[in-house]
Amino acid sequence: VRNIERQEKFSFWLPTSTDYFYPDFVAELTDGRVLVVEYKGAFLLGNDDTREKAQIGHQWERSSGGRCLFLLATSPDADLAGRGLEQQIEEKIR
């Protein structure tokens, strides 16, 4: 589902150094894991905000004991492998 910012009862957020980070999409997978996706255009990958969100999301994933997945999805994909958004998500949830 689309994660709506600042909806106290419904939003999913992660803390940043100055505020909160509301990833774009949140999904519960059929195996019970939670997938969080933050989408960024490739031109935004080098900025401080995106770097901080990626660090926070990856730390959240590592700390979850395999229950949570974080994907910083881009179009085109950040590692230039030519993967579309669907492929990036498929590879993440395997």
Image (spheres, grey):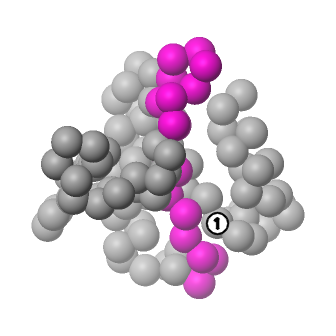
Q: Is residue 33 above or below residue 4?
A: above
> Is residue 70 among the parts visible in the rendering?
yes
x, y (%) of residue 79? 72, 63
Q: Residue at x 34, y 64 (%)?
A: 52
**Which quadrant is the C terminus positioned in?**
top right
Q: Residue furthest top?
A: 31
Spot occupied by residue 74 in the image (x, y as percentages of width and height): 64, 66
Residue 1 part of the magenta-drawn span: no
The residue at which mark 1 appears reads as 74
Residue 55 appears in the rendering: no
Query: Left or right of 79: which side holds 56?
Result: left
Front residue of 64/26: it is 26
Magenta span of residues: 27-43
Q: Is residue 48 above or below residue 88?
A: below
Task: Say which of 60 and 4 sits in front.
Answer: 4
- The image position of residue 76, as x and y in percent, is 74, 71
